[in-house]
Image (cartoon, rainbow, N blue to C red):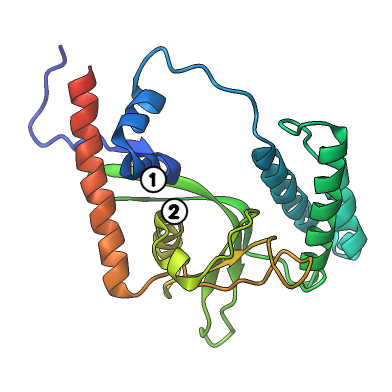
Amino acid sequence: MQLGFDGMPQRLYACTPTRLSTWLDCPRRYRMTYLDRPPPAKGPPWAHNSLGASVHNALAGWWRLPVSARTVTAAGDLLEQGWLTDGFADDAQSAAHRRRCRAMVEGYVARLDPASPPAGVERTVATRTDLIAVSGRIDRLDDRRGPAGGGELVVVDYKTGRHLLTADDARSSLPLALYALAAEGDATAMPAGRAASPAERAGTGLGAHRRVAGPPAASRGGHRGRVRGSGRAIRRRRRWSR
């Protein structure tokens, strides 16, 4: 038994947006995934996870190339070289999705300026409340502030699902809100966000579905309240499960 000392700070519960979302979605699944020991056996890999990781890795790798090498073809080549085949039914299915994703990635980077690199790629950010410390990784962070101080930081979150995203999806997204809150600590302006989805119905690009991830002040307060409430509940559950 460890004795406490008056005035000592309370230990924060370290977690990720995924953990918080799991708790909000299903506390029982949270307990089975993160608390119960031994943990449940993992099932076989999923093809959609392999597809998403392949696209994310290709886009991150493209920005790490020299400026002169940031071409449309280079983005497709990175996708091909790093393609993950786990979870697909067979080689034919994997090849079909690889070709589709190459077209998506190339269509998306064709609209980017290779000479204007983002402020961060695969950047880890963190924020905290009085109960928990949350950290996560942003796919891309753009600094669109001008010399006079106008503009904003923009959280770019790549989405590879088939669901067509809307502004409401962003405003209700706890992970995007947490990323925006974390980035807010390093900027004078509240970041906005942009979700780029490969499932653009009208073309083959990583669609320019723009949405606000930095919600209005009232929404930010609501997300902070959700985080604090989740932190209290998680801490109670952890004490109960010991």
Q: Residue furthest bottom?
A: 148
Which amino acid type is shown beneath numbered disc 2? Answer: Pro
* Residue 130 at least partly seen: no
At 51% from the left and 70% from the top, the residue drawn is: 166
Instruction: List x then y, in percent, for residue 121.
Output: 65, 55
**Secondary structure of the residue carrying numbered label 2:** helix
At 73% from the left and 46% from the top, the residue drawn is: 57
Name the one closer to the observer, 112 or 96: 96
Instruction: List x then y, in percent, for residue 117.
Output: 72, 66
Q: Is residue 21 left or right of residue 119?
A: left
Q: Which residue is mark 1?
A: 21
Name the one closer to the observer, 120 or 23: 23
Residues at marks 1 and 2 touching, judged by CB atoms closer than 8 Å: yes
Q: Which residue is mark 2?
A: 175
* Labels 1, 2: front one: 1
Q: Is residue 150 left or right of residue 11?
A: right
**Secondary structure of the residue carrying numbered label 1:** helix
